[in-house]
Amino acid sequence: MAKSLQLMLMIGRVVAAPAPQALMDALQSVQVTSSAGQRSGFQLSFAVSKRSVITETLLPAGLLDPPTRVVIVGIVGGASEVLMDGVITRHELSPSDTPGGSTLTVTGEDLTVLMDLRHERECFPAMPLNVRVMKILLKYAMYGIVPAAVPAVIFNVPNPIETIPIQSSTDLAYLNALASEAGYSFFLVPGPRPGISTAYWGPEARAGLVQPALSVNSGAATNVESLSFSFDGMARTQYTIRLTEPNTKIGISIPIPDISLLRPPLAVRPAVALKEEPLPDLAGRSPVEVILRGLSKTTQASDAVTGQGKLDVLRYGHVLKSRGLVGVRGAGLAYDGLYFVKSVTHDIRRGEYKQTFSLTRDGFVPFSQQVTT
């Protein structure tokens, strides 16, 4: 259990510096949402009035104009965690006749929004996917973005005599398209220090360090306010490749095996795929591209078991991070064990830090009953 909570807010154009004291004094609440497969976002709420420094000086001076950079750091029990490194995209002023009722709400998204502002057209001759990613991300080094691109499972260098890959989209759209092609994800991880972010292009991290366990139905050891689970039997899909036997002209569906190269299983008994679909968009693709597309689609198949919950960070003692692993105990044999943290929403007010979260995995029964405490 943590005993202290502090919040640091930094703001600036390219390099963020500590926010003016007037902003910190007026800050009422902070909300940060981080989710796998989606852009992270934040919302700041300030108390204002007609004569406040914010409305008379800071707003007219353009301090909160898009795309001003905002860095939000939570300090729990002396340990700091960068929750958001992003830019403002809009703000809303709500005047009120009620004393203390006027508010200014500032909304923004993570730094990937800067990669989605301009349409680019560029060629990448004889470059594998990860090299293309690195070349694009180097343009954003001024924002402290460090690229980390993992080579595709099946390494493929396009022959420039036959084809030259061309980008005709925004950088973000192209990076996401390349990630989908390889069965990967692309997102920014803020931190470990304010002003630094890691641009990760690679498989979902369903291995490695495990966050402290979420305990439910465990008496005094319970550290979540609520946690419930659901199982969707229709969530998973079996993809197939349709071939035609040359002599009989009979169509044959060959299932694509889920070999878990990109998404290691988290449960002993994975859910059965009840739906079957042919692998789309195979025309004109090489065998290597077909294999990569098969891996991509099986990786994107939905997990069948999900969990929804809420916790008090000061009681949990840590900040739960999205896109990582966490243990669950106290829910019974079928649902205990490791989960992938799909999304986390941070709700911070003075003296209070709550998180709502979503967990997911492929099936029932953990490989081990032991979890990190």
Image (cartoon, rainbow, N blue to C red):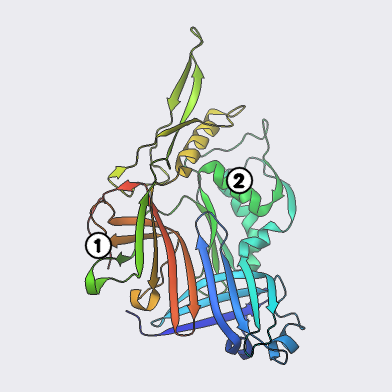
Of 11 and 335, nearer the camera is 335
Callout 2 secondary element: helix
**Residue 334 point in image, percent of width and height:** 26, 51
- Please give the name of the residue rendered at 40% of the width and 34% of the height, measured from the top-left corner: 274
Q: Earlier in the sequence, mark 1 or mark 2?
A: 2
> Which dot marks residue 177?
2
> Which dot marks residue 157?
none
Mark 2 Cα shell of 10 Å, populated few (<14), some (14-19), many (≥20): some
Residue 33 appears left or right of 283: left
Mark 1 Cα shell of 10 Å, populated few (<14), some (14-19), many (≥20): some
Q: Residue furthest front?
A: 97
138 w.r.t. 190: above or below: above
Of 305 and 57, nearer the camera is 305
Q: Residue furthest right?
A: 60
Q: Residue furthest bottom?
A: 51
- Quadrant (top left, top right, bottom left, bottom right) of the N terminus: bottom left
Q: Which amino acid type corresponds to the residue marked 1 in the rendered image?
A: Gly
> Which dot marks residue 330?
1
- Quadrant (top left, top right, bottom left, bottom right) of the C terminus: bottom left
